[in-house]
Amino acid sequence: MEFRDSNYRHPFIQLLVFILIILISATFITLLSMIAGILLFKVPVSEWINLMDMNNPDNLPVLKFLQITQSLSIFVIPPIAFGWFMIRNPWNYLAIDRKPDRNLAGMVLLIGILILPVINLLGVINSGMQLPAFMSGIEEWMKRSEEQAAQLTESFLTVNSFGGYLVNVLMVVLIPAFGEEFFFRGSLQKIFQQWFRNPHVAIVFIAIIFSAFHMQFYGFLPRLTLGILFGYLFFWSGNIWYPVFAHMINNFLPVTLTYFFKDSIAPDELDKIGTGPEAWLWAIPALIASTWAIVYFYRTNKSLQKSET
């Protein structure tokens, strides 16, 4: 396939090419990972349907392996391949080759910490969502899905060795931070920004897709808010590393706290930090502080861009 000057093609064509690359990558890597899984873990194909049994600890290494390979096949490889097809330079297309400013990178990490009580409060508000009576069947399905996702997350994060912790850092922190930002901000946001011709609409639209993609309905508002934050960090700076850093710190905290404070903090309690009867007392100053940090990032980045021109 040849896509010369494809950066100027209609965004719909770009989207179709991106989807085609995802399908090819996901199919090919899934087949390879299944073969590798059978060879490495000695799990016959007939037993793969039972892998979701969380009561069997022998299933966890296989599930983690599949989680890593699936993330690579969907979020990491397709954006890089798409960037090559677009301009023959994925590092430039995804803005990987742009060096981040140390002060701005530090501010991004601070934003990721300061905004945590706000995100957790949104999660509590979201968890109280109730659908109309005629949608009770859908609501029950959503609750079951949420419980299964929470059980899987707890099983993944609960490890007793430093090696297991490092695997979780790779699986939960590094690959999603890089891959999802390459995928959603570096690729999709750029496509839809061209399509809508309005960056703000594109940022919100991709944040909705980003949140919905995780299939955790009672965490939709927190992820939507984070998606909008990541989108603006990329739009303002044109540098993919800032949303990657923000995404990384958001994922790093639960993985690290669960491992180093496993006797006092359970995985299902991490989303409750800063909540409870005094939730607003935490959230309001956190919102003020994180808003100040975001404004500082915007203004400092704008000044740096002016000085470079």
Image (cartoon, rainbow, N blue to C red):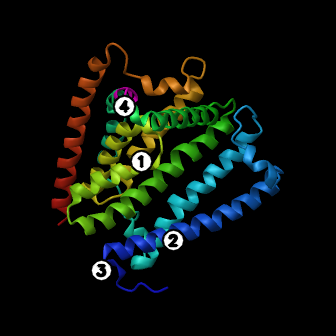
Residue that mark 1 sits on: 212
Residue drawn 50% across and 50% down? 176
Residue 29 versus residue 239: which sits nearer the camera? Answer: 29
Placement of 45 over or under 281, stated as above or below: below
Residue 203 position within the rendered picture, expressed as x and y whole percent measured from the top left: 28, 54
Q: Secondary structure at mark 3?
A: helix
Is residue 11 inside the magenta stretch?
no
Mark 2 or 4: the one toward you: 4
Question: From mark 2 to mark 1, how far is it between C-alphas?
Answer: 21 Å
Residue that mark 2 sits on: 21
- Does label 3 or label 4 sit earlier along the sequence? 3
Question: From mark 2 to mark 4, how far is it between C-alphas?
Answer: 34 Å
Residue drawn 49% across and 38% down? 252
Of the residues shown, which amino acid type is indicated by label 1?
Ala
Question: From mark 4 to mark 1, how far is it between C-alphas?
Answer: 13 Å
Placement of 92 over or under 40, stated as above or below: below
Q: Is residue 71 left or right of residue 275?
A: right
Asked if the residues shown at circle 2 and circle 4 are in contact, with their CB atoms under 8 angstroms apart, the answer is no
Residue 69 in view: yes
Q: Which circle marks residue 8 in the picture?
A: 3
Residue 96 versus residue 258: which sits nearer the camera? Answer: 258
- What span is in magenta? 123-130
Of the residues shown, which amino acid type is indicated by label 3?
Tyr
Residue 175 position within the rendered picture, expressed as x and y whole percent measured from the top left: 53, 51
Asked if the residues shown at circle 3 and circle 4 are in contact, with their CB atoms under 8 angstroms apart, the answer is no
Asked if the residues shown at circle 3 and circle 1 are in contact, with their CB atoms under 8 angstroms apart, the answer is no
Residue that mark 4 sits on: 126
